[in-house]
Image (cartoon, rainbow, N blue to C red):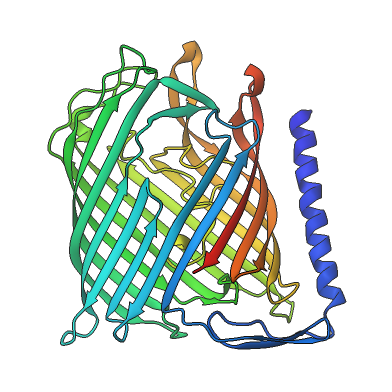
Amino acid sequence: MSLLRTLCGAGLICLAATAFLLALAWAGRAEEPPTGVAGEPYEATLFGQQIYVPPRDRRSVTAANFGVQWIINGPSELEVLPFGSLFVWRNWDHERRRLRGAFAGVFNDINFNFGSRWLKGWELLLTFDSIIIPLGRAEYVEGQRIRDVEVEWNQIYGGIGVAYRTGLKPWYQDNAIELSLTYEPGYLWFKGKQEASPQFKVPTDTYEGRVRFRMRADGMIRNLMELPHRGFAFGGDFVYANRSRWEEWGGVAFDDPDVRKERSYLTATAFAVAAGGVPFVDSERHRLVSALYAGIGKDQDRFSSFRLPGRPTGYEWEALALPLLPGVAFNELFPRRYLVTTLTYRYEVLFFLYPYVRGTWGLVERPRFADGGAVRMSMDQLPSLGGGVISGAPWRSQIEFSYAYNFGMIRDPGGERQYGSHGMFVFWSKEL
């Protein structure tokens, strides 16, 4: 009965939110200024006052991002989780030089493209990514923290390769098709923790070399808040990796790993995002944004599996490649297979104010308790409903509030196993 009440409650919330947005649309249907496009000048009348938004150079962006995620009765030590990063984007020399960097201290991701002046479209690509967290990391099963497998785990990778890039309609600076092939030498190192079981074998420090094929295509027009307004984006990654040393590890809670197979592994991911109007509604204020994400791997282990959700928010062309999974703590799930699809209805109340309603359905591999306390991986459905609002804020900033209820996640408040997970976050971004 509690699950039924929760389903009905979440459904009523979403219906009420949709009705509210449609009422706003009906009230403002007589006068509808055009939607502003990111980076371009924009004029509008607001409460009798003339508003002018000056043009903005989107080829040079530096932004600080901060947020807090709250999973009510969520996994211990992940129930309330602050996050933040510094985002840097530079695109100069007639798009022959580009830098994209996301710097968060414990996590860093950098791509640097050097284009050729003689071979049009061809580029040298340098990459760097690292995850260095000087704390033990456990795994979670049905919301319970499995301390017996806690281990300090860090990784760092460089990368060098070739890329090819060509522009794409509608010809804004981030509209392009980019293909790349890189070799990424890296190193993984581990440290045991006292909280872990004495029977847990710590993995071996090892060199790992990865070959990555990457594709990104972005034909998206974005509005003044940098939200997808019209168009599409799609792409994917294919990775083959090999470890020079990989010896017996684990042996607690989860199935014993096959270290011979895990020494080399394969992963493949794909995504597609499309934005446009609502059918039979002749208005730019109403937007539907649909997205599909999929991943599959072979011979993956805990340290090479996918991590979901990949992001809380973000709409630039690389962030769009990472899946959203509401009501789940960051990196809580570590599947070898997943399929996630989302549909978002968004309404433009004002040129800087965008409430939305979002439905998500996921088919995701996750750990489950079996008879006798053993842990087994299972493909489960993870549907969710939610909504939020994105708004411009003072000092050239933007803020987003979001709530979602995930019907498929299992939580364990007070030792009582139950379905359903409430997730909320607040996200603030300021251009520097």
Q: Quadrant of the image for the N terminus?
A: top right
User: Is residue 393 toward the left or the right of residue 430 in the image?
Assistant: right
Q: For residue 345, which quarter of the picture? A: bottom right
Residue at 77% of width from left, 29% of height from top?
Answer: 2
Question: How many circles with numbers are drawn on the protein?
Answer: 0
- Quarter assignment of residue 162: bottom left
User: Is residue 428 left or right of 83 when viewed as pictured?
Assistant: right
The residue positioned 25% from the left and 60% from the top of the image is 127
- Percent across and percent down for residue 221 are 53, 78
Q: Is residue 294 above or below residue 122?
A: above
The reply to whether residue 321 is in sight is: no
Residue 281, percent across and down?
Answer: 74, 77
Taking the spot 37% from the left edge, 22% from the top edge, the residue there is 149
Q: In the picture provided, is 231 more to the left or to the right than 117?
A: right
335 sits left or right of 40 in the view: left
Task: Give percent across and percent down for residue 401.
Answer: 67, 55
The residue lying furthest to the left in this view is 244
Q: Look at the picture and state if 399 lies above or below 376.
A: below
Q: Residue at x 43, y 59 (%)?
A: 86
Res 397 quadrant in image: bottom right
| 379, 215: nearer the viewer | 215
The front one of 41 and 343 is 41
Residue 61, percent from left and from top: 44, 72
* Residue 109 shows up from this direction: yes
Note whether 230 is above or below 146 in the view shown: below
Q: Which is nearer the eye, 304 or 7?
A: 304
